Every structure is written in C-alpha cells, then in structure tokens.
Image (tube, grey):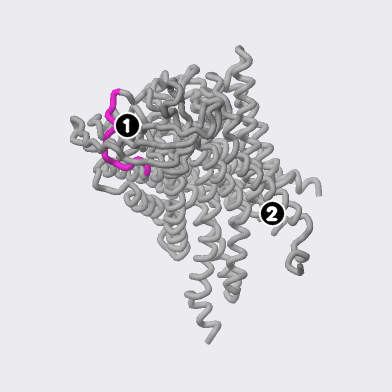
Amino acid sequence: MNALVILTIILFSLMTLIGGKKGVRSFIALFINFLVLLITVLIMTDSNASPVVLTVIACALISAVTLFFINESNAKTKTAFVSTIITTVLLLLFIQFVTDRVMVQGFGDEEVEGLTIYSFYLGIDFLQVATSVVIMSTIGAVTDEAISISSPMFEIHRHHPTISMKALFQAGMRIGKDLLGTSANTLFFAFFGGYLALLVRYKDLSYTFGQIINSKVFSAQMITIFCAGIGVALIIPVTAAITSYVLVKKSPAHKSSKS
Amino acid sequence: MDMIKKIPRKRLVFLFILSTVLISSIYFVYHNHAFYQDPIVQVTKVTIIDEQKVSDGQGNTDIIYTQAIEGKLKNSPQKDERVYLENEFSQSRVYHPEFQEGDDVFVTIDQVQEGDDLTGSIIDAKRDHYLLLVCWFFILVLIAVGRRQGLFAVISLVVNAVLLSLALDVYIATADITLLFIMSLVVIVMTALSLVLVSGLTHQTYAAIIATLIGTFSLLFITILVLAMTNAEGLRFEEMEFLTRPPEAVFMAGVLVGALGAVMDVAVTISSSLFSLYEKNHQISDHDLKQSGIEIGKDIMGTMTNILFFAYVSGTIPTLLIYFMNGAPLGFTLSLNLSLELTRALAGGIGIVLAIPIGLYTTIFFINRKRASV
C-alpha cells in the first residue's frame, strides 16, 4: 500500500474521532484547498494570466473555505475574512518589492541541477511566482490568526456592549500579542523542517558564511521566514481595527444605546 | 523633554541599544566588501544591447535580453577601477536576475593586458545588505506590534536557529550518531525554551511542554511505522533537493522539526485555556474541562492543519510550473514533486490532531496536582 494513502487514512480517522462532524469538515476543507492550489498553478501556466492576481483570488478562496466552510458564515468569520484579504494585499506589495530587490525569484544554482532537462524560457514572470509562493506559505497562518482575534473580540463586545472603539481595539491587540509568539513559531519550525536538507548541504560542502547569506536559495528562504513573520504580525492590528470598527460603528447594540 | 521623561528609562535604554545596533549593522553591511575574497562590482550603468525571441516545443515564448553592465570594483587590488560585464536574463527571470544601477555583484576578473579595460563575468548577486534590511524590518514590525511578545518571538527564532545549526555541526562532526537522535535531543531543548519564552515558568507551561513532546514523538513514531510497513512506497526520496546525505534520515528529521511548532501551538492553546477556566472556577469538574478542551480542539484543528499544509506545499509551485509548462503529465508531476511535501503535511496534521487529547489529559493532570497542593 502507498504510504501517503495510509497516512491520509490515519489523519482522516483521527480528525473524525476527535473532531466529529467539524473534524470531517476540516478534512474536506484541506482537500478543497489542495485543489484550489493545484488549479491556481495550472492556470498560472497561461502566460497571459498574472500570477499575482491569481494568487490573490486563490488566497481569497482558501481563506473563505477555511473560515466559512469549517466554521460558518457569520459576522465573526466575515470580519476575519476581510482582515485576511487586506493583510494579504498589503503583504503582497511588500513582498513583490523585496523579491525584486533581493533577486530571489526562480531557482538557485543548487536547484537548477535537477531541472536541466527542462526549458526555462517560459514567458511567465517568475518574480510574481516567487511572490505568490511566499504569500501562499503564509495564508494558512494569517487566516488562523484573524479568526482567533476577531472571535474573542466579539465575545468581549457581547459582554460589554458599551465598550469604546479604542478599548475594544486595545483588547484585540492584547489577544493578538499573546498569539504572535506561537503563530510565528508554527511557521518558523515548518520552514526549518523543510530547509534541513539545505542546511546539511551547506555544512557538508563547507560553504563560507559569505557564500551562504548571498546565495539565492538561502536568501529566498530567509525572505520567506521574514515575510511570514511580518504577515502574522501585520494581521493583528488589521483585524483589531476592522473588528472594533464593525462592532462599535455598525452594531445595533451601539445604536440602541445611543437613542 | 517632557516627552522623553515620560518614557520609562528601561525602554529608553532598550531603544538606544536597538538603534545603535541597527545603524552600525547597516553601515557595516554596506561597507563590508573588503571582507569578501571574490571581487565585487557595483553596477553604475546598464544598457540592454540585445534582445532575442525564443520559443520551445511546447509553444512557450520568452525574450532573452543581454545587458551590458558598467561598474566599479569595490574591493581587490584593482579597487575603484572600471569594469565591463555582460549579463543574459530572460523576461521570465527563472534563473538569472536583471541587474539595476546600485546592485552589487560578485565577479571573476579576466586576465587583460596592461592598459586595456577590465572585463569579467558575473558569479552572482550580492544579497547580504538587502537581506539585512528586510531582517531589520521584520524585527521592527514584530516589536512594534507585539512589544515584549514580539521581541520574544524574534529571540526564540534566533535561539532555535542557532540550536539547530549547532546540532547539525555535532551530527556532521561525529560519524556514528544518527541525525534523528540528535534532532530528538534538540527538539526537547527547543520545546522547553520556546514555551518558557512564550508563557514563563508556570504549571501551564509544564503541561504544554510535556504534551508537545508526547505529541511530536507520537507523530514521529506513527510516520516511521507507516513508512516501514509500506516500504515508503510512493515517496520519491530521489527528488529531494540539496542532498548530500542519505535522504530518509534528513527527511525524517525534517518531519520531526517541522511539525514541532504546530504541535506546540496546539498544546499551548489547550493548556492555557483550560488553566484559565480553572482560575475562574476552582471547583470545575474534570468532565467539564474535558468537554471544553475538546470544543477548543475542534475549533483549531482545521486551521492548524491548513497552516502546515500551505507552509510545505507552496514551496513546490515554481517546480510544478516548470514541469507543467514543459508538457509533463499531471499525475507524474504531482507524484514526483509533491509526495514528500504531502507526507510532511500529513504527518504534521496527525501530530496536531493527536496533540488535542494529549494536551487535554496532561493539562487536567497538572490542574489536579495543583488542586491537591492547595
């Protein structure tokens, strides 16, 4: 039997056993998100399509599946969704700029070795592709944080309907700060795990420090780590601001307390 | 003056040290050319001298540009002399970048006769200064948003990276220890350090540390078992990049380290929320704690598995594109390029889900110990 199939079955059984119906939905969401990613890559092969635009659409879909399908469509998930999209776009502009300056698009010397039989003259902008890689690596964490901040903020507002916008914003920031360390760690370790082979290579072939930090592959991975960190930090004020605005300015509780 | 007086002294000292380090490190990285062996050229002028349309058998078209680069040597005996270089890059920039004025590049200088213009060829771009700028931006954003917690996140990243690097040094220096064994030891240290940094020396932290370790090692055990039972069928180890060592060992160590952060996240979420329930009501029953724990677990399971999935799989997008655009069949491309990443994501997912009940029971155990002690 294929190892992947068995691992998938184990994961599915565990999710069902522990998570019940919500566990099953979470598993299906994972599968749908995989399809979204795959279809995005397939559309990217058309050189007329802009990879960055496709990435924004894909991120919106992925975040929608995670928020609306696993949880449900309500005010909490909607504000989390809007916050995710705004953060993604902000982050995207930053990453695009950075990738261009640091020149980490495409493949490094260490990666080209395995791809020599393929043509590289493909007519699609790999600068944009590099940007989408970074954004896509972070989208899961950004969505997770958005809902983890907006949901308790709704609870606070429910218990204290007269809370001011500023106080609510500050409460959101406090919740976010507590999440920052663990969310950043989740991504950092995931990247470390993925880059282990590269680190072993650098040490085995005794690269100098200068060679390592200037190499394209290492720079690309450090940029991914830094941008992911900026993403999980940036989502905090964005979500706190949007949620407090929606709750205080738009909520019926506030209007009724005024009249 | 009043403004400055209002800021606590400790923070003032911190800000002073931070800005000193920031400014001096940036100054250094922009003037470190003398420390490099390879000659470095700063680009002063670029002109496109040739462009050529190409197309391949799959109907992909691209343009190859040749740029003539004029620059000034920043180090080596011929410092400050003018150098002429050429660079070829394609519109898609899959491999070679397009250079702009102000970029620094590593070069080899050709042998020329006395009096002739210096020429050379480009090795690669110098990226350290840009990397440092992004690094500082990352640090500042994290501190601005998270203050103390942001600083701790940065510290934890640095400490963990150093620990991993040291562990790899030990692995390479000693022939007879397996990578997985060393990584297991480091995982224990990293877990304890990261979690203490996140939430201090409390019962809640101890519960999270123990739950993380049990969760991570169970996922490792399950993955090793499955791979052994199936003879790792379907896993294309030969496609692993950057290899200089047996792929299975490096891969399993990667699975272990990669899932650690996510399992920690779950363990912390469960233990901190159960402890806060206990703080609010010391009489709360084990049954109620269990119920709440499972509810929290259900809420985070989906998003957490998603995080790992995208963190792993997104990196393969450029390779997938190269395969697809060269007409490689879908199934072949996916099984070749995604099998390892999917295994990582699935193993991590198993760890995340397992961490929920494990975290639950460990935390309840610690709560009951605390109950008995008061």
Q: Amino acid at mark 1?
A: Leu
Above or below, B56 relative to A53 = above
Q: Is residue A58 magenta?
A: no
Q: Which label number is shown at residue B334?
A: 1
Q: CA distance from mark 2 to mark 1?
A: 48 Å
Same chain for marks 2 and 1? yes
Residue B364 locus on image (x, y percent): 67, 45
The x, y position of residue A111, in whole percent, is 40, 27
- First in sequence: mark 2 vs mark 1: 2
- Could you tell me if residue B262 is visible in this image? no
Is the magenta region chiefly helix, strand or loop?
A: loop
SS of the residue under disc 2:
helix
Residue that extends furthest to the top in the rendered view of this protein: B176
Q: Are the residues flagged by discs 2 and 1 in contact, CB closer than 8 Å? A: no
Q: Nearer the viewer, mark 2 or mark 1?
A: 1
Q: Which residues are magenta?
A: A117-127
| Magenta segment includes A123 | yes
Q: What percent of the width, then of the height, locates residue A193?
A: 52, 32
Q: Which residue is mark 2?
A: B278
Q: Residues within 10 Å of mark 2 (few under 14, many from 20)?
A: some
Please state the chain letter of the residue tagged with numbered disc 1 in the rendered image. B
- Is A229 drawn above or below residue A221 in the view shown? below
Circle 1 Cα neighbour tier, 10 Å, few/some/many (<14 / 14–19 / ≥20) = some
